[in-house]
């Protein structure tokens, strides 16, 4: 049984694939900058509709999804992703934590929750990826 994204990357012969969905361009750019040197490939999209279409095309090792976005918000996007790929691991990112929404999403099954605002430092990024056992390339 594969227990980490790092093992998955090794088993499939390449880096772990991560989809980040956030309408905040600064967040996308920051994650792109912080991810340099890690054994992962990021795809970054600004909205939920594009994310659902992308997940429909192929699975990702991890999806990181902002809850508050215009159009198809994170809750709708999360539900659609889980309908398309029920076993798709999803991390929820949000500065707006409505307990009822979180409970609904929890029942469907997200694997972690990151509350904004978070100080996205290299140390935070390393800890977050370390949680999923993705490490810097040697």
Image (cartoon, rainbow, N blue to C red):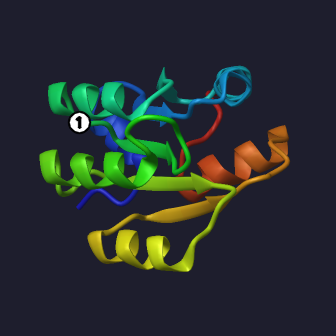
Q: Count the marks.
A: 1
> Can you tell which quarter of the image residue 48 is in?
top left
Residue 92 falls left or right of residue 31 = left
Which residue sits at x=69%, y=56%? 95
Q: Nearer the viewer, residue 103 or 110?
A: 103
36 lies above or below 83 = above
The residue labelled by disc 1 is 59
Residue 23 place in picture, x, y as percent = 57, 30
Residue 4 place in picture, x, y as percent = 41, 54
The C terminus, quarter of image = top right
The N terminus, quarter of image = bottom left
> Can you tell which quarter of the image residue 109 is in?
bottom left
Label 1 SS: loop
Q: Nearer the viewer, residue 75 or 135?
A: 75
Residue 20 place in picture, x, y as percent = 50, 34
Which residue sits at x=36%, y=74%? 104
Residue 95 falls left or right of residue 81 = right
12 lies above or below 89 = above
Residue 33 place in picture, x, y as percent = 73, 20
Question: Badge 1: few (under 14), some or many (20 or more) residues near its Cα, within 10 Å?
Answer: some
Which residue sits at x=29%, y=56%? 2
């Amino acid at each position: 049984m594969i227990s980490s994204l790092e093992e998955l990357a090794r088993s499939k012969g390449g880096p772990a694939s991560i989809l980040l969905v956030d309408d905040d361009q600064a967040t996308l750019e920051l994650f792109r900058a912080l991810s340099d040197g890690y054994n992962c490939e990021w795809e970054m999209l600004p909205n939920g509709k594009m994310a659902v279409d992308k997940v429909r095309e192929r699975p990702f090792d991890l999806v990181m999804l902002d809850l508050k976005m215009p159009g198809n918000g994170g809750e709708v996007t999360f539900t659609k992703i889980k309908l398309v790929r029920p076993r798709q691991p999803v991390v929820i990112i949000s500065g707006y934590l409505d307990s009822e929404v979180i409970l609904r999403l929890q029942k469907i099954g997200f694997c972690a929750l990151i509350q904004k605002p978070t100080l996205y430092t290299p140390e935070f990024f390393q800890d977050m990826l370390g949680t999923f056992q993705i490490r810097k390339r040697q």
